[in-house]
Image (cartoon, coloured by chain):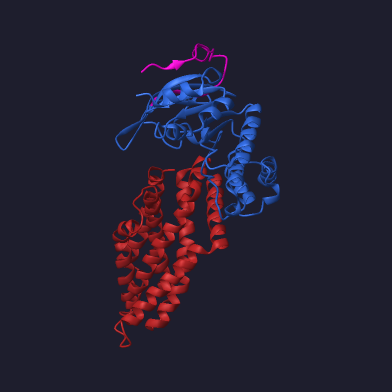
Amino acid sequence: MTTALRQIALVTAKDLRIEARGRQTIGLVLVLGVLIIAVLGLGLGPEGRVHGADATAILWVAYLFGGVLSFEKTMALEREDSAIAGLLMAPVDRGVIYLAKFLSNLVLMLGLAAVITPVAILLFGFDLSAAPGGFALVMVLGIIGFAAVGTLFAAAVSSTRLQGGLLAMLVFPITLPLVIASTQMLIAMFRDGEPLGGVGLAVLVAFDAIFLVVSWLVFERVLEP
Amino acid sequence: MSVIANAEIKSRPVARVVSVVQALDLTKWIDGRPILREINLDIPSGRFVVVLGANGAGKSTLLKVLATLTRPSSGDLRLFGQAVGADAARLRARIGIISHQSMLYRELSARDNLVFFGRLYGVRRPEERAMDLLAMVGLADRADDPVKTFSRGMTQRAAIARALVHEPDLLLADEPFAGLDAPAVKALEELLGRLHGKGKTIILTHHDVDHSLRMAEQAVVLRAGQVVVDRWARQLDAATAIREMTAA
């Protein structure tokens, strides 16, 4: 257990160190995220057809596209010069590699969210003061589930010649329950004044737990050198 | 299909020599095609073996199977006298692998790469080990430069250092000379020779048949996924090897 945690920390730290040196992934993802928010904000017009909590759906659009780009880039890093083969040759459980890549993606996704969420809040006049903690909890749970699914499928897709838009085509439908549950819950909280909890929260927690465990178990089958 | 086999290799007393690799009827199917067909090999400790074959003969797949990176479809594989099974990771920890791709993280320095892999393998004092290896391959003065700034020859030397960071008993080298210029080829050849001199078992794939036969002790020729020659390298000439690689 201690060895596994140490190895997870090593691989995650390696990924983040590479990202910190090049800032290639986070730079692209941030630009894409901000552009999506800006384009949708401007496209919807000054009349403000999207108000307050409704903007969470638009936020999810930015999270989804930014996330897919992030997942693809972090796996591409492993495929470059076949570095993944060196990693797979080490006495490291495949599940450990999955959890480390998941953590790397989660950190990048949270970085993306930390930048584009305030932009969306400003652009769409989303007043968080009623339940800022609830908003953060719902979004973080959503992002955890999305990163869990995205990490698994990015590894699977990177082993094939079918890249490009395939990852988005696979991940978006699977992530739909997360998007629906978190968006409906936030709208109910901020527009209708309902408390945090209920079925929506249970869906998010169950989704995260199921996809983390299943991905950890099947990662060995999808990761080819 | 008959296999040209040297009597000395076939009848060697395996009970007295520790076999590093024992393959029995190894077969590997990929996408419905047999890439390896009933491969039988017995490679003792300390042997320098070259695996020859035309493109698509199955050399790289064979090395991936021996590295436990991919599982054979059927047949038995024993490494260091133990069957490869659930504890493949423990056996894998005794294997080093190099190929025409460096398996290094290009954004990181050579030292960072080696320290990272050293820590994954649980090497004691990985920083010290990294610098020793970089000195051995002549890269000590470039230790802190990102690998992406290295020439092809320097990258390959760094890759060898990575493959040796955990002091493996078996080194698998898949086309390590690909893309190297003449001085780099010579340096790599000398390095492999030194490793062999230290008792490491080396299994090499290489397109230059003549060069391979000069370096190695044992030559295995694959044709369409099958072993068609397994004999002492000194008793095999390049013309015969090429004929066996390409015979219909």
Q: Can residue B18 be seen from the camera position used here?
A: yes
* Most foreground residue, A131 or A152: A152
Compared with A121, A106 (above or below) is: above
Place of residue B246 in the rendered image (x, y in percent of width and height, measured from the top left): 39, 27
Place of residue A137 in the rendered image (x, y in percent of width and height, measured from the top left): 42, 68
Asked whether residue A182 is drawn in magenta, I would say no
Q: Quadrant of the C terminus of chain A?
A: top left
Place of residue A140 in the rendered image (x, y in percent of width and height, measured from the top left): 42, 66
Give the left or right position of residue A149, taking residue B197 as reference. left
Compared with B35, A36 (above or below) is: below
User: For the magenta stretch, what is the residue range?
Assistant: B1-26
Give the left or right position of residue A178, taking residue B160 as reference. left
Asked whether residue B21 is drawn in magenta, I would say yes
State which chain is coloured blue: B
Place of residue B168 in the rendered image (x, y in percent of width and height, measured from the top left): 59, 34
Residue drawn at (51%, 28%), measured in percent from left and top?
B209
Compared with B171, A161 (above or below) is: below
Compared with A59, B80 (above or below) is: above
Quarter of the image holding residue A48? Answer: bottom left
* Most foreground residue, B80 or B223: B223
